[in-house]
Amino acid sequence: MSKPLPIVKCGHPVLRTRAREVPAEELRTEEFRKLVRKMVDAMRAAPGVGLAAPQIGVDQRVIVLEDAERLMSKLSPAERAARGRVPVPLTCIVNPVLTLVRTEPVTFFEGCLSVPGFMALVERAVEVRVTGTNEKGEPIDWTVSGWPARILQHECDHLEGTLYVDRMLTRTFGANDEVLARWAAMDPADVRARLARPGAEGA
């Protein structure tokens, strides 16, 4: 088995450009099937719950996501419920089009394989709809809420050249070990209040 491709890190221009559409005829090629396999291998090796093609240096509008039980094993039932985190089977979406269905913001800590070692609070819409095709060209039309909606928004942002650091609540940005030790178990609203600028409301 070949070694998984490395994840492209922030600073690389491929992460700051709009990825190109994948022509329908490319879906039938062995090269495209290999791309999807490489994306899945890289995501699982990281490990992560989602990956966009630009994160392995490919400027194509392809994302993969998978959230397995093992990746949420450290969360309590209450934490899982608060996040709306549920298992997501391996899914590939080509040329995804994302629509916000319920736009009320939900705020939780978020990280990124392309910005390793850090995380911050990010506001995301609670429910989204995504359309596109799978890797075989079959249509996808998926409306989802909770953590899967967050993953979709994060990965679709990558296809537009956007990173979570562009959306984060900047004063909550921190190294993973510090955030996990001090803030991750707190209610996000309390974190914002604690880390707000003196005299300001929220971070």
Image (cartoon, rainbow, N blue to C red):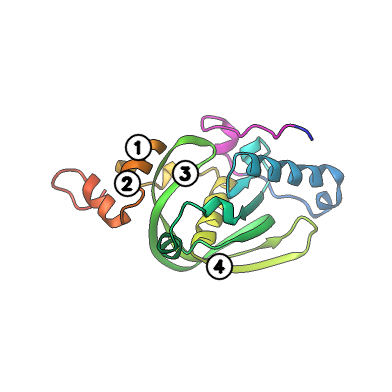
Q: For the residues labelled 1 and 2, say whether their Cβ atoms are less than 8 Å apart.
A: yes
- Residue name at image x 63 percent, y 53 percent: 65
Q: Is residue 100 left or right of residue 196?
A: right
What residue does disc 4 label? 144
What residue does disc 3 label? 111
User: How busy is the neighbourhood of tag 2: few (under 14 within 10 Å), some, or many (20 plus)?
Assistant: some
| Mark 4: amino acid | Val
Circle 2: element type: loop
Magenta part of the chain: 3-18
What residue does disc 2 label? 183
- Precedes in sequence: disc 1 or disc 2: 1
Q: For the residues labelled 4 and 3, say whether their Cβ atoms are less than 8 Å apart.
A: no
Query: Looking at the image, which is closer to me, 22 or 174?
Result: 174
User: How busy is the neighbourhood of tag 3: few (under 14 within 10 Å), some, or many (20 plus)?
Assistant: many
* 35, above or below 136, in the image: above
What residue does disc 1 label? 178
- Precedes in sequence: disc 4 or disc 2: 4
Q: Is residue 60 left or right of residue 200?
A: right
In the rendered image, which quarter is residue 134 located in? bottom right
Magenta-colored stretch includes residue 194 = no
Q: CA distance from mark 4 to mark 2?
A: 27 Å
